[in-house]
Amino acid sequence: MKVKRPWGYYTVLNEQKGFKVKLVSVSPHKRLSLQKHKYRSEHWVVVRGTAKVTKEHHVYYLKNNESTFIPKNCIHRLENSANKPLKIIEVQCGTRVQESDIIRLSDDYQRI
């Protein structure tokens, strides 16, 4: 099932106790909120496009077949500064892999 968001959409590919796998699509020139999670870590693998990643005070770019790890409580953001959609596979691992574990610190869409 495709879940629409102001920045694009995600589809849950698999979910079991302790983990969730999503396909995340970020529309051109959109970004997710600056956020952290108390109960889960995330692994991101870029499968199409170039991801701009903010991880604490570091900003870097990932291309196709590159990945990063976001540990629990790490402030982070995913952004697409290109003209084509960005697609990543996100693997969440933890005791709570639900949307309620998003702690938004800054958001372009006033969802704080």
Image (spheres, rainbow, N blue to C red):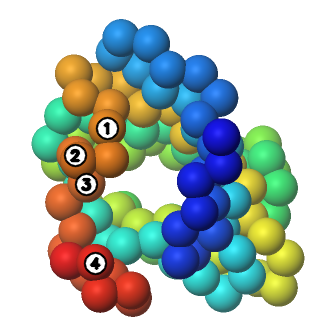
Contact, CB < 8 Å: mark 3 with mark 4? no
Q: What is the x, y in percent for residue 80?
A: 65, 76
Looking at the image, tell me whether mark 1 or mark 4 is earlier in sequence order. Answer: 1
Q: Quick check: 26 left or right of 111?
A: right
Check disc 1 and give the amino acid type. Answer: Gln
Q: Nearer the viewer, residue 53 or 110?
A: 110
Contact, CB < 8 Å: mark 1 with mark 4? no
- Mark 1 packing: few (<14 Cα in 10 Å), some, or many (20+)? some
Q: CA distance from mark 4 to mark 2?
A: 14 Å
Does 59 appear above or below 93? below
Q: Quick check: 86 left or right of 14?
A: right
Contact, CB < 8 Å: mark 2 with mark 1? yes
- Mark 2 packing: few (<14 Cα in 10 Å), some, or many (20+)? some
Check disc 4 and give the amino acid type. Answer: Arg
Which residue is pictured at 23% across the width and 68% down the height? 104
Q: CA distance from mark 2 to mark 1?
A: 6 Å
Contact, CB < 8 Å: mark 1 with mark 3? no
At numbered mark 1, what does the secondary structure look like: helix, strand or loop?
Answer: loop
Does 77 appear above or below 40? below
Check disc 2 and give the amino acid type. Answer: Asp
Contact, CB < 8 Å: mark 3 with mark 2? yes
Residue labelled with disc 4? 111
